[in-house]
Image: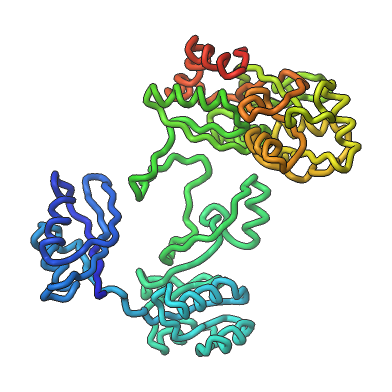
Amino acid sequence: MPGAVLLTSSPDRPGLVAAIAGAITGAGLNIIDVDSHLELGWFHQRVEVETVGGATDDAVTALERAAVVAGLDLARTRVRALPAPPVPTALLVSKAPHCAADLLARADAGSLPIDVRVIVSNHPDLGHLAARWDVPFVHADDVRDAAEAHGAELFILARYMRILPPEVCERWAGRCVNIHHSFLPAFVGADPYRRAHERGVKMIGATAHYVTAELDDALPAGSAASVTLFTPHLRVPDLVVVGSHDPGLDLATGALARRGWSARVLAVGSLGGLAAARRGECDLAPIHLLDPKTDAYNLPFLSEGLDLVPGWRRMQGVAFRPGDPRFEGREAAEAIAAAAADPGCLMVNRNPGAGTRLLTDKLLAGARPEGYWNQPRSHNAVAAAVAQGRADWGLAIAPVAAAYGLGFLPVAEEHFDFALVAARRTRPAVAAFLDILTDPALRDALEAAGLRPA
């Protein structure tokens, strides 16, 4: 069915959403998709519509009339037909084919509204790719003339490894898009992945932006910057917690939420959380790390700038299905040794970097029993694997084993504490979380959950 899309930015006012929806409905259109957000007093919305039976105008005309009726800022409102005609496009490439190949495939499938008129490159390597898609290929240093000669209106740098001259950036302003690794502008130049990895960056990916002559300009590391979120569904959390996970942590962050603070919790294991705290990427890192040299928990792992905040104690042990004679009634060390030597006894491990994984490796003393490389990321996942018969045993904490109706052989009471970034101690949400840790209500809740407050 014929459709159209409206993009508008208008000064916000009470009833604006209702006015837009009412005007669209009154114009004989049906809304099929809408997205909007409010920013600095301006209301931004994208509305996709279709005509319904009995409509006398086409969708574009009807939607333009609705914009007037709704009182939108027409200078900042655009209406276009759907499906949109493909945009004449030139792809600029060098030697890597993956971006160009993906764009060509999406264009051919109709999921990307572009009409690739030419592929221009400063190397001859990708001529075969152009031939496969029956697209003209031009090997030239002067990419501007080659691209424009084929009538392109949109110019995509699909891993084009040269910097466009400022005059070309100005000529193609708003019509030239660069697809590149996601490390710009922090890691400019050659070999960005290696240099990013050396700085501790572990996430990779791709991004795209309009080309400007100031692409590589960047703030120095550590600079303060204002950030605008482009969707109402995102909110910067008041507290960031990265590290190990525990049912008690859910109780603590729940209490924090009831005080009006938001928390973002990432379960990456104790060592991952400790690394994030050292880099200043979180406020608190929950950890339960046993130092094999001193048999002390957590404190030996702290470095300058980190403080240890006591949390609670929890019992780690072997979780198994009740009635299994290989475990029932035995001591944990004896049962683990026997299970490790039995090829028919399948274990479930934990992910590298988890405190439980370090304890497991210590108990196994170098053994690698069947199932060792099955490495889920939580105590619940371990207990679920045992309860469902996908494994025979694994290390988990007592409250989780009990929740799944499993047998349990105690191994050690471990310390679940928090590595606090000292410089963030006075932040309001951090102070609130620290206060909650001493709250009698939380302590009662921890004890009810089978945990022992420190």
- Image position, residue 67 (x, y; %): 14, 62
Q: Residue at x 67, y 55 (%)?
A: 194
**What's the residue at 70%, 20% (across, down)?**
315
Q: Residue furthest front?
A: 323
Of 120 and 84, the residue lying toward us: 84
Horizontal side of residue 65 vs 59, given as left or right: left
Q: Is residue 40 above or below residue 61?
A: above
Q: Residue at x 43, y 35 (%)?
A: 237
Apparent side of residue 69 relative to residue 361 in the rendered image (left or right): left
User: Residue 387: x percent and y percent?
Assistant: 68, 36
Q: Is residue 275 visible?
A: no
User: How is the structure coloured here?
Assistant: rainbow
Where is residue 27, by image quadrant? bottom left
Image quadrant assignment for residue 149? bottom left
Q: Is residue 220 visible?
A: yes
Q: Quadrant of residue 271?
A: top right
Quarter that holds the N terminus: bottom left
Looking at the rendered structure, the number of numbered marks drawn on it comes to: 0
Against 281, residue 211 (above or below) is below
Please state, as top left, top right, bottom left or bottom right, where the C terminus lies in the image: top right
Name of the residue lying farthest toward the top: 440
Q: Along the horizontal axis of the image, is 116 left or right of 186?
A: left
**Front-most of 46 and 120?**
46
What residue is rendered at 65% in x and 53% in y? 195
Q: Position of residue 343 (x, y in %)?
A: 88, 43
Residue 57 drawn at (x, y percent):
12, 75
203 over 452 or under it: above or below: below
Q: Nearer the viewer, residue 421 or 241?
A: 241
